[in-house]
Image (tube, grey):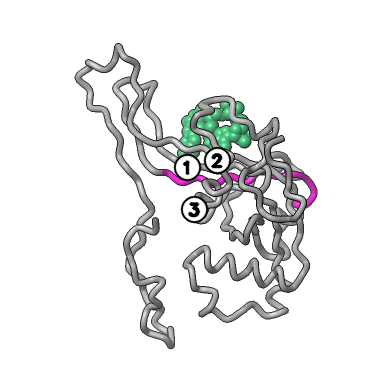
Amino acid sequence: MADEADETGEEVARLAETDRTRLRRKRDRGTFDRAVATAILDEALVCHVGFIADHGPVVLPMTYGRVDDELYLHGAAANDMLRQLVRAPACVTVTLLDGLVFARSAFKHSMNYRSVVLFGQLRRVVDADEMQAASKAFLDHLAPGRSADARRPSDEELRATTILALPIREGSAKVRTGGPLDTAEDLDLPIWAGHVPFGLATGAAITDPSSMRRDVPTYLTNPGNRA
Ligand SMILES: Cc1cc2nc3c(=O)[nH]c(=O)nc-3n(C[C@H](O)[C@H](O)[C@H](O)COP(=O)(O)OP(=O)(O)OC[C@H]3O[C@@H](n4cnc5c(N)ncnc54)[C@H](O)[C@@H]3O)c2cc1C
């Protein structure tokens, strides 16, 4: 296997290529390059967590944070999903939509994207320092620098929170770029073909009426695209 976990515990440059992560369709769009995968994880804001719950398969959207090669999820200690998640392996997927692709043929319409699929067993975080580090990662994932401003979670707040960690180890990334890929016989059809880029845009920050601090932090003052 190309990507055995490093014995020194250091991050390895590639995600693990296993029977379930090996891309079969459109293999040329796939990569096990950890840097590509982590860049996607850091840019996206929402993941989808798939697992087998007591009543059957479930896929739920969640936010997340990353510290080195660990992906952290969190929720209320009373959250049933988080309790079920540590019982069996899960799959976490992250998607960035980069564009819509309009081909001449209906069949060849597509999307440009960057996505990551991770497999593994989630672990409940109990160490107080690791919980604080994960909490910092959740905030800095929303806006780098936010954790330095926000009040840290109290012990009581941490007790009311379940934090789970997934190793960023067994997974894959897949990337589609560019325009439509019509077949040669369709190229002369008088139908518009091309692609429409997509991006996540933010608006200007709106200060809460009761906020004691009125000036918007610099990490929130650029209302343009996040990317
Ligand atoms: C925004 C978006 C829209 C899509 N729409 C469609 C659609 O409508 N129809 C469709 O058939 N496919 C769509 N795809 C592609 C889809 O995610 C699969 O890659 C594709 O269906 C091939 O599935 P498979 O099971 O044959 O892949 P296989 O290549 O057999 O999958 C094997 C392994 O490859 C890896 N892998 C597969 N897909 C991805 C991925 N997207 N990202 C990272 N790793 C991956 C996983 O580890 C998976 O277990 C879309 C992808 C994105 C991101």
Tell me, for residue 214, which label it has, or none: none
Q: In the shown orientation, is residue 214 left or right of residue 144? A: left
Q: Quadrant of the C terminus?
A: bottom left
| Of the image marks 2 and 1, the number of the one nearer the N terminus | 1
Q: Is residue 58 visible?
A: no
Residue, disc 2: 173
Q: In the shown orientation, is residue 26 left or right of residue 133? A: left
| Label 2 SS | strand
Whether residue 100 is situated above or below residue 65 in the rendered picture: above
Residue 59 x, y percent position in the rendering:
62, 44
2 or 3: mark nearer the eye: 2
Is ligand 1 closer than 8 angstroms to the Cβ of mark 2? yes
Q: Residue furthest front?
A: 8
Indicate yes or no whether the magenta region holds residue 90. yes
CB atoms of marks 2 and 1 within 8 Å: yes
Q: Is residue 206 visible?
A: yes
| Chain part drawn in magenta | 84-97
Residue 179 x, y percent position in the rendering:
33, 31
| Label 3 SS | loop
Q: In the shown orientation, is residue 158 left or right of residue 192? A: right
Q: In the shown orientation, is residue 100 left or right of residue 124? A: left
Residue, disc 3: 44
| Of the image marks 2 and 3, the number of the one nearer the N terminus | 3
Residue 47 x, y percent position in the rendering:
56, 50
> Which one is nearer the viewer's eye here, 200 or 25?
25
Q: Residue furthest left?
A: 190
Find the distance from the CA under tag 2 to the CA under tag 1.
7 Å
Whether residue 22 is situated above or below residue 212 in the rendered picture: above
Residue, disc 1: 114
